[in-house]
Amino acid sequence: MPFADEGLRAGLRRAEAGMLLPALLVGAGAGLGAVAFRWLIEVVTLVLSGHDDYSSAGHADNPYVPWLGPYFVLLAPVVAGAIYGPLVYRYAKEARGHGVPEVMYAVARTGGRIPARVAVVKSVASALCIGGGGSVGREGPIVQIGSALGSTAGSILRMGEDRVRLLVACGAAGGIAATFNAPLAGVFFAMELILRDFTARGFAFVAVSSVTAAVIGRSVLGDERFLDLAPLGVEHLASYALYVLLGALAGIVGVVFTKVLYGVEDICDAVWRGPEWLRPAAGGILLGAILLALPEMYGVGYPVLGKAAVGGYAVGFLLVLLVGKIIACSVTIGIGGSGGVFAPSLFVGSMLGSAFGQTLDHAVPGLTGSATTYAVIGMGAVFAGSARAPITAVVIIYELTGEYGIILPLMAAVAIATGVSHVLSRDTVYTTKLRRRGVDLDLTGPAAVEVRTAMGPPPAELAPGTGLRAAVTAMIEVGAGRLPVVDGNGRYEGSVGALALSRALHEGRPEGEPIETVRDRPPALLAGQSLEEALPLLAASDGDGLPVLDEGGHHLLGWITHRSALAALHPPA
């Protein structure tokens, strides 16, 4: 019954406890989404490589195309890119890249609104990218998928922006919890990176979602630790100095990872001149060459990470894998791939830590402790150096390993890595992407709200050559005091105000006289400008609002008024 449905929605909107059920449902959706996404990656990987995880298969052939030998890896990324490239370009451009910055932007700037189609497109595109050899992680996609589910739930229930943001964070937490079997890390990831705020209210609902997703993940995927290691601990007090040194190196490597990631993306942008939908397939040739040289870079690479953590590789090859992962991940993102950078940072940290530990053990045998300890601590420290989320880094390493004996050196290394990263770089691996688009998440008030968020739809458009009387009729019908003039190609040509029209008709001008005689061009705003820039222009306007144009300044996107600006600054609960 519509009445009953509307009453349920209203009750959920009003009651604080009403958030509990949506949080639980979003967590369940994120958990199921993580399971389905993981299965989808496994299917695509098996189809395109012939192996459950090709990163641990060496230069093996694909049994489905044995005549290609190991050279099939030159084609796998091309085939995958030829499918997901057009899919992303046509249906959800937000699905390109590593996902987390888009969620952070939605929470900070658009009231948590994420199109529902993003969940579907991101799932398919990322599964194809990773299964086709893309050297990226699965956590970024599932964060975006879970967040899109949370946003959709908030929209269906017609919740206010604060609650929609909270449900987005619930979805992100559920995705991390189910993907890594790490419910605590899911909570802190959502609070530290997505909401960028810690409140008891927020923690409670995010925790419900994270626990629900983790329970579903464990029931389907099993309750096994990500890394099953022998007990670890600190053997010598002097080792703490070495962990601090590792933290400093990890902070530097985390910043280098970020710089290379966006540097390669800039190079790809500068070199590519074809259509964007074709870019992943064309760039897949380069990625395939990297995979042919270093098959350990195929996909997420968790088996390689685990082998490195227990000392399965020599120091020289560990450094090759470290550099290879940074380059392969950067190329995957640069060519338009879809996947996360969380897992690659853990991979790089494991290589760094294991190489560091083995080197020390050769230099001073028996005094430095297990190289595995350094590998595990390196994972958390490099992630902290790239993302600057120290709480998440400590918690997730503990949950991935269950090793409480290394919590003190882990905290020390993570703290140092975070501090070094702050000194060397203004932004993180996530906020750099937003900064390059002109978005600063640290801004507040009008400076933090973009005009595109505050604008409404444009009023009725007038075509060039419209008569004065026809313009008046249109203005009366829509109840507006100013109407835009837009030509047949959609280009904005100015606007016509009610005062100018009334004066012209009062002067006795012909009713069929074209509106060009009274058209003017009041200041226009670009969608990406902030309300801090827009408010002075609005204050100086005639009170009928101002046009909002695209970034090129040619096409009309919307209309901003004093009322819509006020609503954006102080949204209803």
Image (cartoon, grey):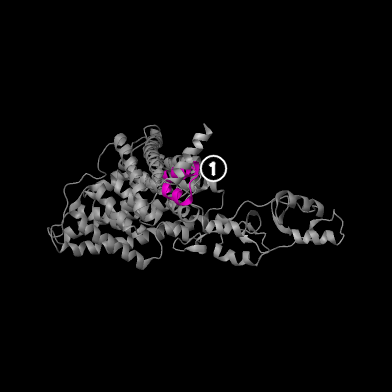
Visible in this render: residue 361?
A: yes
Would you place residue 484 above or below residue 61 in this image?
below
| 416 vs 160, nearest the viewer | 160
| 161 vs 440, nearest the viewer | 161
Residue 303: give x, y in percent of width and height: 29, 43
Residue under label 1, please give it.
Answer: 91
Helix, strand or loop for the magenta stretch, by majority: helix
Residue 555: give x, y in percent of width and height: 65, 54
Q: Amino acid at mark 1?
A: Tyr
| 352 vs 283, nearest the viewer | 352
| Count of numbered badges drawn on the protein | 1
Magenta span contains residue 161: yes
Which residue is drawn at the image coordinates 17% and 58% (left, top)? 361
Secondary structure of the residue carrying numbered label 1? helix
Position of residue 473 in the picture relative to residue 178 (left or right): right
Query: What segment carries the magenta color?
Result: 146-168
Visible in this render: residue 354?
A: no
Position of residue 344 in the picture relative to residue 97 (left or right): left
Residue 378: give x, y in percent of width and height: 26, 56
Which residue is drawn at the image coordinates 44% and 54% (left, top)? 104
Magenta span contains residue 546: no
Which residue is drawn at the image coordinates 85% and 54% (left, top)? 511
Neighbor class of circle 1 (other Cα within 10 Å; few <14, some 14-19, many 20+) is few
Residue 524: give x, y in percent of width and height: 65, 62
Quadrant location of residue 301?
Answer: top left
| 21 vs 14, nearest the viewer | 14
